[in-house]
Image (cartoon, rainbow, N blue to C red):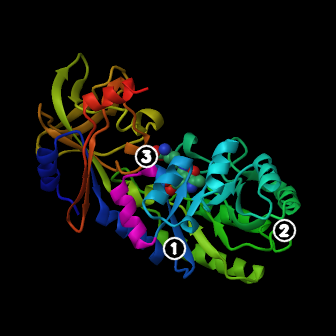
Amino acid sequence: MITNDKFVELARTYGTPLFVYDGDLMLERYRELFSFIPCRRLHIHYALKANYNPALLTLLRDAGSGIDAVSPGEVALALALGFSPDRIIYTANNMTDAEFDRVMKTGVTVNIGSLSRLKKCADKYPGSRICLRFNPDVCDGDNAMTMTGGDLTKFGIMLADADEAARIAGSGNLHIIGLHEHTGSGLQHAESVLKSMDNLMEIATKERFAELEFLDFGGGFKVPYKDDETRIDYVDMGRKINEKFDRFCEKYGKELLMRFEPGKYLSAECGTLIVEVNTIKHNRSRVIAGCNSGFPQLIRPVLYGAYHKIENLTNPDGIPSLYDVCGNICETGDRFAEQRLLPEIREYDLLAVKNAGAYCYSMGSVYNLRPMPAEVVIADNKVADFRKAQSDEELVAGILRK
Ligand code: LLP
């Protein structure tokens, strides 16, 4: 565990804003999944979109993880870091023909989520081995924008089209080696995972899909963001997942591989963004703590109304008061927290924004032309990797490049 003193030391050494990742915690979360889900044929494919830090990816690669990639860029990064093509699944939606061709050439399994793309695949790549993504028809997630299942979203082939999918696949002698579903991110109810599994298994009959090697149930495992949020009982859920899968394999007549694609579960809690407060302002009704980062570097509060716990690293025992913790971007919504009770914040205090390991750096941008922060990875309790921030000059050179 990285202590608050260590966070302060890292901030003093490397400067702020600074993303700090606890690689040991990420590996602990990875291994936990294998103890929760007692299936010998479980493969975890980390959803790289959550955090693409190369040092973290290398730790996961060495631990045996595969990758869930959603763009040719993500496939290219995973391959460059030595993930073997058979441990990468490419699940893009609305991909272009050129993207499809590029990934088919790599030997990575492509996960097709529309009948239209399936037809094109049958015509152009007859005999190939592919996976089909279905919409599990279950709505869950931590907010409307991260619910993936259900008929209002763009994802996957509808379950009712399973026969048509099998027919199209047959027309091109495609080998359907896997079926996939992803219900949403930050799933609130364990039952949703089980219901989605049921729905996918219902269409995964030997008559329709005789050559299955795996079923992939996506990601979505929730982690608590608030202190009073309860952790889902993953031991109980894992046992139910396993029993369900065993029953399915028995019926199907073959021991298939079980795959999950967690992003948040592995990386959210391992990340912390350290920022420095440079301005305290007493506006009429609010005290503003203005810091040297902003929503382009951690967008979840603005985009989803997400809660990220904040700690005052350098004045933890200060008298608590209400603050708006704001960033340095020219927009009113540029806040990490609104009316948050925090120990007294003084100028030059260091704040830690917690659970910043998933969908923070990876959703970052250089809006207002502020380069993304440096990143430090801790593994084996020491600094394993440091990735420095781009300088303003490098950022400008990139913009002027033709
Ligand atoms: N598999 C597929 C096909 C996905 O689309 C996703 C996430 C995952 C796996 C991993 O889901 P996770 O285990 O991380 O929940 N930016 C949002 C989350 C978007 C998730 C997109 N897809 C957020 O910050 O909450």
**Callout count:** 3
Crowding at mark 1 (Cα within 10 Å: few <14, some 14-19, many 20+): few
Q: Position of residue 295 (x, y in %)?
A: 36, 32
- The part of the chain drawn in magenta is 50-64
Q: Nearer the viewer, residue 76 or 48?
A: 76
**Where, quadrant-wise, is the C terminus in this rendering?**
top left
The residue singled out by tag 3 in the image is 359
Separation (CA) of disc 1 from disc 2: 32 Å
Residue at point 49%, 59% (across, down) = 79
Q: Which mark is residue 236?
A: 1
Q: Position of residue 60 (x, y in %)?
A: 40, 66
> Does mark 3's beta carbon lie closer than 8 Å to ligand 1?
yes
Crowding at mark 2 (Cα within 10 Å: few <14, some 14-19, many 20+): some
140 relative position to 362: left or right = right
Separation (CA) of disc 3 from disc 2: 37 Å
Q: Position of residue 37 (x, y in %)?
A: 52, 75
Q: Position of residue 241 (x, y in %)?
A: 59, 73
